Amino acid sequence: MNDFAHLLDRLAYEPRRNAKLRLLQDYFAHAPDPERGYALAAMTGGLTFREAKAGMIRGLVEARIDPVLFRLSYNYVGDLAETTALIWPGPSAASPPPRGETVEVGVVPLGAARGRSATPIPLHEGEGSPPPIGHNDPPPHIPTLGEVVDTLATTKKSDLPGHIADWLDALDETGRWALLKLITGSLRVGVSARLAKTAVGALGGHEADAVEEVWHGLEPPYATLFAWVEGRGERPQTLNPAPFRPPMLSHPIEEETDFDKLDPADFSGEWKWDGIRVQLAGGRDAEGTQVARIYSRTGEDISGAFPDLAEAIAFEGTLDGELLILRDERVQSFNVLQQRLNRKSVTGKLLEEFPAHVRAYDLLTADGEDLREMPFTERRARLEAFVGGLDHARIDLSPLVPFATWEDLAAARADPASAGAGADADAIEGVMLKRRTSPYLPGRPKGPWWKWKREPHVVDAVMMYAQRGHGKRSSFYSDYTFGCWRTVEGGGEELVPVGKAYHGFTDAELAKLDRYVRNNTTKRFGPVREVAYGPETGLVLEIAFEGVQRSTRHKSGVAMRFPRVSRIRWDKPSAEADRIDVLERILARGEREIAPGAAMSEETR
Amino acid sequence: MTPSASDLLTLTREGLYCPGGDFHIDPTWPVPRALITHGHADHARSGHGRVLATGETLRIMAVRYGEAFCDTRQEAQLGQPIRIGDVTVRFVPAGHVLGSAQIAVESGGLRVVVSGDYKRAPDPTCLPFEVVPCDVFITEATFGLPVFRMPDTRGEVDRLLASVALFPERAHIVGAYALGKAQRVMALLRQAGYDGPIHLHGAMEKLTDLYKREGIPLGDTPKVVAADRAKLQGAIVLCPPSAIQDVWSRKFPDPVTSFASGWMRVRARARQKGAELPLVISDHADWPDLCRTITETGAGEVWVTHGQEDALVHWCGTQGIAAKPLHMLGYGDEGEAEPAAEVAA
């Protein structure tokens, strides 16, 4: 457990992907089975157990530490798990004895339940006071991660505090911190499941996709997986009848350079839908029961959030497509889909108002046959037949966009409504190009699939604050908060922050921006600097973004999707930057569609 | 009649003042006569008339402020009583940095010990703290909360060396205060068996040279040549904490940013500083050592100068020791000051 904790500790501070990967690989190469398997499960969300409550942890501490000192410490540190980890009386805690009498702050009734005598723990130990706890006991047993997980899953609720106290006694500070984060369900590793799988695969020179292929049939602690990647065992046979298959991703096309090298006749065109990429997988298990799964692009099982769509998976096969909200057969914009996402509970009302659909654009497997090696055109023909055979209102086909020349395609991209998309045009964010001969390749191979997004929205905004970045950028002011003009009540103009961007510029531009921030700083707040801005002074940034949403977090009331710096307007006076009305108008256009009727009108807000 | 402690030492705008000897201890403003506990800038300022301090502290002040940092200087021999007016003072090692001393002030059978900053953990670059039994103990409380229990420094240095081994193509830049912490980190690296060069930011050179002249072996410590920064793959580089956020740190090969400080004990603090490899190495007494030291002095009364005084005053109360915070301003601006002050500096 301590080794895993020290890995988490390093990862928590490491911003670089490649360095994280190295730390993970180093851990997986050295940690024994089954410990590393449980660690992998902790990082991929594969552990389930009853979580410990904060109140119980607090009670354990207050039985050992003066509550006033604990409160002062907690106020200072600001995190219960960390305060507890740091303040827990370790075996080496040596403080002088109090004068006169030993102040015994509480006893440990918890250990008694597990056969240990209830030893009073003095808060301060040293000469003249009783020996430190555990002085005559054998050294405490440091729990393995496996023991922790197993105990949490099987133990009675009333026995839990005793176990936790014993573990805290045995672990070091970092171990205590990681344990408490894990058992209270607040472990944030800063590592994606994908990265952890990449590190495991690298043990045996396998790509992450190879791990994904077998992943969904496996259970913690993944002994067969480690045996396979290390060449000690067979490739695990996936028993999951509806496994996730890593999706094929596209590259953005560079208009100036790429089109010249490509022949329009080699490619098939489709709309690029502004929804979420999903995979629908269906199959029958050994008992003949239908299994239906909806996976996100990264392999997360999101079936629970879309029961209306999962019902539609009565087939045996794997469909690749876009999850969209359809009303009256019309695709709704991403703003509408947003209302359906990230909800804690899926209510009947939500299902009714935001019905989920899938617009399918590829077929990976069908009735036990793997189609991924086939060229796109053959898969497309199979897809059309497959979806036609389903005849289900929730699943339809993403239409092809015919074109003969790149100019034809450019016209379709510029105006989807008149190029066949009709009323669905609002949910289209560009076009896709797929090489007719290409197989379905997991990952992001360069060449077979291209995306050509429509022009983003742009707004000219004024830089207001800058913050230092992380990792390679830790000495650069690379994150910029920018604002637009609005009228103050009672007249006058002010800049109000509308968003934050930290990419879109080159390294050379970053160096210039950094110099600008350093030379124009007016105030400092820790890692943040305020720069000079106003009608007469300030730097205008052209910000490109994909859309606007209503936001209660921002003072301006709006939030942009994917904002990035598209140009630095060294030449433009800040007084000529855009007003917030520009964003309000884009917002208003989107909001009209969010709910039928006027549920989002100003009166109900 | 035994005088009371508040007759012996009073609090003035300049800091602690002894009317019986007409001197200040670690004054934050220029005064005619100053006794200085150690060389950190918040305790040792220039512009005083006469200065009494250990030889090392006087030489540190001369390096930092120039030879003319005061009108006249007097060297205090450790452990030797010195008569000043109606009182006797004695300098005793404090274990904080090279030359650091506590100052015991005595008159009419009453002894007050001004600890200055101190620590109990071993430090190869300075003499260890000695307990002076006293009636009133005036202590710092920089890390005066029970969450501050500093780990063994060996483990911290091992983590740095493990990272250098795992990332041999990256430079490891360690932010450390230029007086004391930096040299302690160098000495700890040598103790751990690291014998490669330890590269120094220019701001650390003079004080490191002084440490070497004072007989503390620190090995090869070349100054970083600006043009060579990109070549320092796998190197360990020490610099003042502020230099990590400076453009200076940028030219190193994919640097790992590290800080050596007691504040690294708390994650939010470490993250705020942008540390990727926080090293918990403190030059101040941690909570158990603050409590232990107060008890060992046998003091019936404790005054807390600066830091997290609330918890320590509360703890003294639970031990039946009278305690009060002095709320002294101006301390903690160097060494392990609140990091917020450092960022703006």
Image (cartoon, coloured by chain):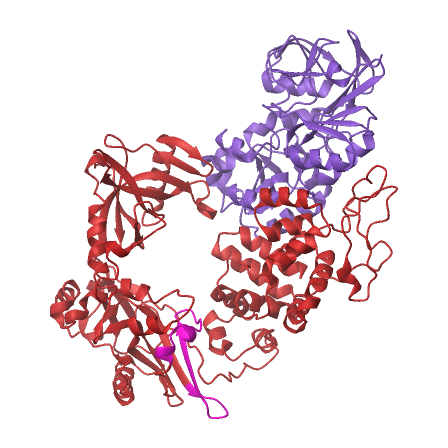
Residue B201 seen anywhere in this rendered image of the structure: yes
Image coordinates for residue B106, horizontal then vertical, percent = 81, 16
Toward which corner of the image does residue A321 lie, by quadrant?
bottom left
Please name whichever residue, A349 or B103, is drawn nearer the observer in this view of the structure.
A349
Please name whichever residue, A538 or B233, is drawn nearer the observer in this view of the structure.
A538
Please name whichever residue, A382 or B48, is drawn nearer the observer in this view of the structure.
B48
Image coordinates for residue A54, horizontal then vertical, percent = 60, 57
Residue B157 seen anywhere in this rendered image of the structure: no
Which quadrant is the C terminus of chain A positioned in?
bottom left
Image coordinates for residue A255, horizontal then vertical, percent = 21, 59
Which quadrant is the N terminus of chain A positioned in?
bottom right
Q: Which residues are magenta?
A: A283-310
**Which shade is chain B?**
purple
Q: Is residue A254 left or right of residue B155?
A: left
Toward which corner of the image does residue A250 lie, by quadrant?
bottom left
**Which shade is chain A?**
red
Image coordinates for residue B196, horizontal then vertical, percent = 65, 41
Which residue is at the far bottom? A288
Q: Residue at x 52, y 34 (%)?
A: B340
Q: Residue at x 41, y 74 (%)?
A: A295
Q: Residue at x 46, y 85 (%)?
A: A241
Q: Is residue A70 left or right of residue A389?
A: right
